[in-house]
């Protein structure tokens, strides 16, 4: 069990990184990220890639987390405070009573991530997903359906934003992802690594039920409203989810769940080279 460090002053400089959490969400944390809640903390503490920097817990959360805390190195301080002090530090009532500061690994290269995927691989490619709830929901689906990787273009928001991590229930700490460069061509990147790519769009010519799975498959999702860029849609097979007459819009996170489930568990796998 690591040493528990009591804190009774909201202005204690040792916990400065936890002060005014919501305001710091907007300005960044110098390359670190904030994990919130017991489930997300578990993913952080068991992640082979991310590292905890420190923890801040409500006093009544320390004992229930004893088993999880046992494996922490001595170099990771665990601060604890009474609930009123904790709320004063973070700037709002922190009902979960659990925060942790984490350090991500160096940003991986998209080509390296795809090259390392096995002969049967499934990836999602996100273009212009700027909503943190949608980002977290997509990563949650990616973890649930065993995706090998997620690729993000330069217009996507940060998967390690506190709300995105929380909505994903820690999946953004589990699913490998890489960010494409601003000038990168996502279709060319996928082709370079032998991935068959499909574009999700209400105007797609193929119903999802008829989509067959290639051994290395990528599904591209765009932002709600504008969707995928026309330059991307024009180069890929378009896939649609049939809906009731007069309605053709699904939340992008919901769309990803339906599509990834189909590709992971339903679609027959065919070798398109044959």
Image: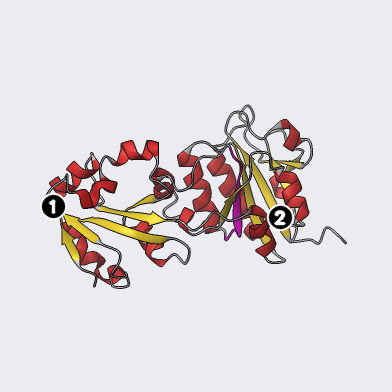
- Asked whether, in this view, residue 11 is left or right of residue 163, the answer is left
Marks 1 and 2 close (CB-CB < 8 Å): no
Q: Residue at x 19, y 64 (%)?
A: 4
In the image, residue 61 lies at what x, y percent?
A: 21, 59
Q: Nearer the viewer, residue 85 or 251?
A: 85
Which badge, 1 or 2, comes first in the chain's sequence? Answer: 1
In the image, residue 87 lies at what x, y percent?
A: 19, 44
- Asked whether, in this view, residue 137 is left or right of residue 149, the answer is left
Q: Which mark is residue 217?
A: 2
Mark 1 crowdedness (10 Å alpha carbons): few <14, some 14-19, many ≥20: some
Q: Secondary structure at mark 2?
A: strand
- Residue 210 in sight in this render: no
- Asked whether, in this view, residue 191 is left or right of residue 261, the answer is right
Report which residue position mark 1 lands on.
Answer: 82
- What's the CA distance linking mark 1 and mark 2? 50 Å
Mark 2 crowdedness (10 Å alpha carbons): few <14, some 14-19, many ≥20: many
Q: Is residue 148 magenta?
A: yes
Q: Nearer the viewer, residue 246 or 3?
A: 3
Q: Which contiguous range is marked in magenta?
A: 146-154
Give the quadrant of residue 111: bottom right
- Residue 220 in sight in this render: yes
In the image, residue 206 lies at what x, y percent?
A: 75, 42
Disc 1 versus disc 2: nearer the observer: 1
Give the quadrant of residue 1: bottom left
Q: Is residue 30 magenta?
A: no
Classify 129 as above or below 62: above
Q: Residue at x 59, y 39 (%)?
A: 154
């Amino acid at each position: 069990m690591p040493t528990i460090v009591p804190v009774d002053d909201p202005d204690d400089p040792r916990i400065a990184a936890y002060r005014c959490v919501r305001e710091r969400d907007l300005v960044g944390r110098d390359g670190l990220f904030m994990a919130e809640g017991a489930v997300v903390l578990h993913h952080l503490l068991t992640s082979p890639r991310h590292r905890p920097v420190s923890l801040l817990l409500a006093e009544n959360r320390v004992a229930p987390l004893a088993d999880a805390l046992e494996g922490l190195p001595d170099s990771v301080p665990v601060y604890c405070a009474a609930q009123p002090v904790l709320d004063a530090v973070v700037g709002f009532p922190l009902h979960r009573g659990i925060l942790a500061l984490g350090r991500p690994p160096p940003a991986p290269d998209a080509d390296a991530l795809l090259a390392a995927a096995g002969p049967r691989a499934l990836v999602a490619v996100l273009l212009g997903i700027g909503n943190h709830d949608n980002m977290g929901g997509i990563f949650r689906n990616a973890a649930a359906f065993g995706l090998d990787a997620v690729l993000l273009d330069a217009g996507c928001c940060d998967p390690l934003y506190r709300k995105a991590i929380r909505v994903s229930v820690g999946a953004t700490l589990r699913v490998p992802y890489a960010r494409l460069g601003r000038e990168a061509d996502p279709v060319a990147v996928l082709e370079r690594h032998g991935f068959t790519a499909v574009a999700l769009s209400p105007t797609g010519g193929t119903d999802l039920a008829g989509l067959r799975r290639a051994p290395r498959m990528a599904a591209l999702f765009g932002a709600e409203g504008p969707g995928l860029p026309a330059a991307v849609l024009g180069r890929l097979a378009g896939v649609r989810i049939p809906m009731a007459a007069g309605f053709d819009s699904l939340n992008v996170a919901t769309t990803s769940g339906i599509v990834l489930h189909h590709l992971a568990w339903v679609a027959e796998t065919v070798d398109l080279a044959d």
